[in-house]
Image (cartoon, grey):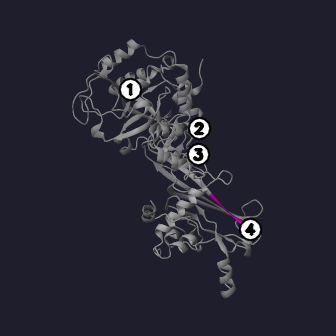
Amino acid sequence: NQPFSVATSLIPFVENDDANRALMGSNMQKQAVPLITPEAPLVATGVESVAARDSGRLVLAEEAGEIIYADAQKIVVKNQSGKTKEYILVNFSRTNGFTTFHQRPAVSPGEHVKKGSVLADASTSVGGQLAIGQNVRVAFLPWFGANFEDAIVISERLAKDARFTSIHMEEFVCVVRDTKLGPEVTTHDIPNVSEFKLRNLDEDGVVRIGAEVRSGDILVGKVTPKGETQLTPEERLLHAIFGEKAKDVKDTSLRMEGGKRGRVVGVKIFSRENGDQLESGVISRVHVEVAQLRTISVGDKLAGRHGNKGVISRVLPEEDMPFDDNGNPVDIILTPLGVPSRMNLGQILELHLGLAAETLGYQAIVPSFSSATEEEIREELKKAGVAESGKRILFDGRTGEAFAQPVSVGMMYMLKLHHMVEDKIHMRSIGPYSLTTQQPLGGKAQNGGQRVGEMEVWAFLGYGAAHSLREILTIKSDDILDVLKSHTRRRLSTCLFVTYVDWESTSNLLGATQDERPETKESQL
């Protein structure tokens, strides 16, 4: 008799949420990132264990028996007839979403298990229940403009305790081909590359496992034969004089992509010599797996289960966070203006019931459309020794003074979504231009520039930023003559040999159109 989808059934008090926000809450649970220390929700709906089991990611006992061995690699169960069954666990494998899948033992030697009991949890479950987030202490409070427009203020403690820390893994592939000019070769000896950049490569040019890599670092050193047509005139001259053929290769190494970092955790090499089947023209393939630990930071996106999403705007020291009369600081400060117009009041009910559940030490189960009533929540708060309103006086962590009004404080289940700042942040000083328009390319993938459209121009006009506007629409865009002129200026300013005597010849040599020295301009005036 389940009236909703699995995702919607996981939202407590869904009957108190507006349909639009319930839809967002359902969809955003699919975007949650597996955390290294997952927690089952304090306020659940009862569907969590069914969802976790039906995912097929848990290890379940095929028959009743006793655990005789359990570690991170395997679990051994002895049944009643004395036969043993071995269950192999998966350790940190890459998922399609570039996160990691991991199985953790949920039993210990000596325990007796029934058929269907959970032997090992997945990276998104605890005790056989779906666990895709963290139970955090939340206060609804405006905080000096830092949580304006759904922004979120969090405590530094969340980062220190690795509460929202996740592991991300990506695979980079280097294909070694047989070209018309000869075969490509993976090697440690790459022309015009410093020893420092080669420090993590083995003799075959493959990065060693455990190496820390950043953007631009070489993962697989590879050289490709270069034909006579690809040689520069200087190289041709050297070949003619010295007959040097050793440098007839170009560097085509696999490098870490821009803006990425991590630690090499796996290297796989497939080659024809080892009998691996590869497509025609391919000699070998090298797969390098890089893992990265990401702590929560400014710019990451958090969300509750009620469509209450936001981006972290500030990470405050623990001592600066508001605290209650018991000295407990809050973990997250949300804006109270995000509730009334969105009509997702389920989050407030979850907040209050979560506080009672945490204080009294139980997990509250509230199925869809048969949840706890307002009176029942008041009763639970009374049992927990908290005001029936669920509000309490908080104190400013920086001054120690009490806030003027009581504040709604409680426990809420928050998820970290896969929209992380590290994947999106981008900056450019110089970079590629479009051949057709001569304007900078767009987007992070192309190392593009910041787009300034019609409405952005109006914003600059409104602020009277004339010089910025002129620069953006000319020299930083497609005014080629102005660009060349500025390059000439820069080159002239770095030429130490320029004197007033040879100004004309130097400026002609470098393509300057006129004498642009301040002294001459003043004299001309």
Q: Which residue is mark 2?
A: 62
465 and 297: which one is in front? 465
- Provide residue 176's location: percent of width, then percent of height: 68, 65
Is 322 placed left or right of 53 in the picture?
A: left
Q: Residue at x 61, y 45 (%)?
A: 96
Let me know if residue 127 is in the magenta part: no
Q: Which residue is mark 1?
A: 362
Q: Which residue is mark 3?
A: 95
Amino acid carrying label 3: it is: Thr
Secondary structure under badge 1?
loop
115 and 233: which one is in front? 233
| Boundaries of the magenta span | 173-178
Q: Earlier in the sequence, mark 1 or mark 3?
A: 3
Q: Earlier in the sequence, mark 3 or mark 4?
A: 3
Q: Which residue is mark 4?
A: 178
Labelled pair 2, 3 in contact (Cβ < 8 Å): no
Viewer-nearest of labels 1 and 4? 4
Residue 68 in view in this figure: no
